[in-house]
Amino acid sequence: MAEAAHTLPVIESPCIQICTLGPGNFCVGCFRTAEEIGDWLSYSAEQRQAIMADLPRRADSLFSDDGVSED
């Protein structure tokens, strides 16, 4: 069996394969914006971690009576 030329890095993602944009242009599956989803692979690990740290707040906002707030 031939060896791969190089190994691709594992990139953490909050994607759960429910890709539907809801209020505030946030995905109702992972709570990222369409732009964040599209640019995910070009972000640094630090940028991805910062977004992921904010996902619980987005989830709470998305399902609250007030909708999403982009403070």
Image (tube, grey):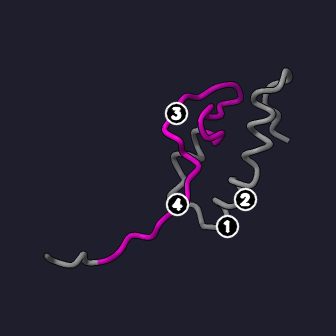
Q: Position of residue 67 (x, y in %)?
A: 80, 25
- Number of the front mark, 2 or 3: 3
Looking at the image, residue 32 lies above or below residue 18: below
What are the residue bounds of the magenta stretch? 6-33
- Number of the front mark, 3 or 1: 3
Q: Looking at the figure, which quarter contains the N terminus?
A: bottom left
**Element at badge 3?**
loop
Question: In the depicted view, which residue is nearer to us: 42 or 62?
Answer: 62
User: Three-letter amino acid code at disc 2?
Assistant: Ala
Q: Position of residue 33 (x, y in %)?
A: 63, 40
Q: Within 10 Å of the Cα at label 4, are there few (<14), some (14-19), or many (20+) other Cα atoms?
A: few
In three-dimensional space, the C-alpha distance between marks 4 and 1, rounded to whole angstroms, equals 11 Å
Magenta residue check for 32: yes
Tell me the chief SS of the magenta region.
Answer: loop
Q: Looking at the figure, which quarter contains the C terminus?
A: top right
Label 1 sits on residue: 46
- Number of the front mark, 4 or 3: 3
**Element at badge 2?**
helix
Marks 2 and 1 in Cβ contact (< 8 Å): yes
- Give me the residue at 65% from left, 34% from top: 26
Q: Within 10 Å of the Cα at label 3, are there few (<14), some (14-19), or many (20+) other Cα atoms?
A: few
Question: In the depicted view, which residue is nearer to us: 25 or 17?
Answer: 17
Marks 2 and 4 in Cβ contact (< 8 Å): no
Label 3 sits on residue: 18
Magenta residue check for 23: yes
Label 2 sits on residue: 50
Marks 4 and 3 in Cβ contact (< 8 Å): no
User: Three-letter amino acid code at disc 4?
Assistant: Ser
